Amino acid sequence: MMDYSKINVLFIILLFWGFNLTSQNKYLTKTGHVSFEASVPSFEEVKAANKSATAIINTDNGQFAALVFVKGFHFKNALMEEHFNENYAESDSYPKATFKGNITSFSLNKLHTVSEFKMDGELNFHGKTKPLKDLLIKIEKSNDTISLSGEFKVLASDFDIKIPKIVSNKIAQDINVSFNFTLIKK
């Protein structure tokens, strides 16, 4: 059996090393918040949150990357969490989700108040990669901290996630994803 912890540590080191080659102006967090919801009215809430996402932004060029360990998503219902990890996300086979993108027209000088930007990138989850275009994000800078937040929708089918017919009316095909990162200058 593969030791995913070593692979994940290597991935994080390579990700940050790549950012080091091009910039000395980077902000980082290891406590970012990512959540998703696929609830359907009149049925049990299908919602999970992960409060240990890693993210980095290069303020020289607006490059942004985030890494989330799939088993870090927690549900109110332990059985739902177990089904998510075993049957839908298959988190033993696909232990992480990543996003890599660029913030359009990013400038650190524009961050005196909450500013809106658009971001393009690629989301990788469940072994599949989906391009995401024109994500509306909010960014604010305060001293040596940058706050970045936003939300977007994806389809379960975009990532080859099969929802069995028996529960298909209880889980939405459209998944709302939201994120909030407080990044500190490194």
Image (spheres, grey):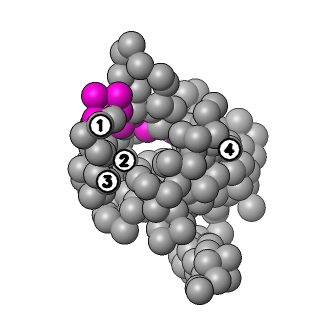
- Marks 2 and 3 sit apart, C-alpha to C-alpha, by 25 Å
**Picture quadrant where residue 81 is located:** top right
- Marks 1 and 2 sit apart, C-alpha to C-alpha, by 37 Å
Q: Is residue 68 above or below residue 46?
A: below
Q: Are marks 1 and 4 in contact (CB under 8 Å)?
A: no
Direction front: furthest residue: 166
- Marks 1 and 4 sit apart, C-alpha to C-alpha, by 31 Å
What residue appears at the point 36 percent right and 22 percent down from the top-left corner?
40
Residue 146 locus on image (x, y percent): 64, 43
| Region rendered in magenta | 168-179
Q: Are marks 3 and 1 in contact (CB under 8 Å)?
A: no
Name the residue carrying label 2: 119
What residue appears at the point 64 percent right and 62 percent down from the top-left corner?
25
Q: Are marks 4 and 2 in contact (CB under 8 Å)?
A: no
Q: Is residue 74 left or right of residue 162?
A: right
Q: Is residue 52 above or below residue 182?
A: below
Q: Using the image, tell me which numbered label, if any, was put on residue 161.
A: 3
Q: Is residue 173 magenta?
A: yes
Name the residue carrying label 4: 51
Nearer to us: label 2 or label 3: 3
Give whichever of discs 1 and 4 has the lower sequence position: 4
Give whichever of discs 2 and 3 has the lower sequence position: 2
**Crowding at label 1, few (<14), some or many (≥20) Cα neighbours within 10 Å?**
few
What residue appears at the point 29 percent right and 45 percent down from the top-left corner?
164
- Marks 3 and 4 sit apart, C-alpha to C-alpha, by 23 Å
- Marks 3 and 1 sit apart, C-alpha to C-alpha, by 15 Å
Residue 174 visible to the viewer? no
Q: Which element carries disc 4, helix, strand or loop?
A: strand
Give the amino acid type for the residue marked by disc 2 in the picture.
Met
